[in-house]
């Protein structure tokens, strides 16, 4: 799925007041954490995940793995927080036109 810049900006605006729903700890990306992310994104469509690592390369690898496994889009990365979006069947978030 491809989003326009306007749609990404819209989603960033919606994500701004959200708190991270999943926190990755010392164990990193485990099956349990992936299942929790999958559950949260299926329910909310737009979530924040906090990745507690200072290494940029490791953080990017974790983000890439989450995106690959959940088939979500990484809308924004700010510090240790990544914003993920994946539309559900119910279409809770109505995106603006391209």
Image (tube, grey):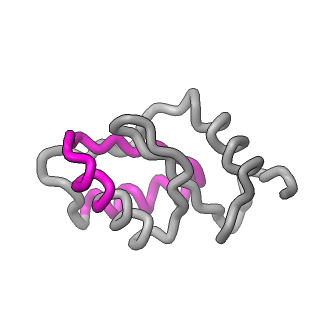
Q: Report the residue that reaches farthest toward the right.
A: 97
| Residue for point 72% across, 42% down | 10
In percent of width and height, residue 17 lies at 57, 27
Q: Dividing the image into 4 quarters, which one contains the C terminus?
A: bottom right
Magenta-tinted stretch: 32-61
User: Depth check: 10 or 57 in front?
Assistant: 57
| Residue for point 37% across, 35% down | 79
Q: Is residue 41 magenta?
A: yes
Q: Is residue 94 magenta?
A: no
60 lies left or right of 88: left
In percent of width and height, residue 88 lies at 64, 64
Q: Is residue 74 above or below residue 23?
A: below
Q: Is residue 62 above or below residue 22?
A: below
Q: Report the residue that reaches farthest toward the front.
A: 57
User: Depth check: 43 or 58 in front?
Assistant: 58
User: Depth check: 94 or 43 in front?
Assistant: 94
| Residue for point 69% across, 42% down | 9
Q: Is residue 5 above or below residue 30?
A: above
In percent of width and height, residue 78 lies at 44, 37
């Amino acid at each position: 799925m491809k989003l326009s810049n306007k749609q990404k900006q819209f989603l960033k605006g919606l994500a701004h007041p959200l708190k991270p729903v999943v926190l990755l700890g010392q164990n990193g990306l485990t099956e349990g954490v992936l299942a929790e992310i999958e559950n949260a994104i299926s329910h909310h469509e737009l979530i924040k995940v906090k990745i507690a690592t200072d290494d940029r390369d490791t953080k990017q690898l974790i983000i890439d793995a989450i995106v690959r496994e959940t088939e979500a889009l990484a809308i924004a990365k700010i510090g240790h927080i990544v914003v993920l979006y994946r539309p559900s069947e119910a279409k809770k978030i109505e995106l603006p036109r391209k």
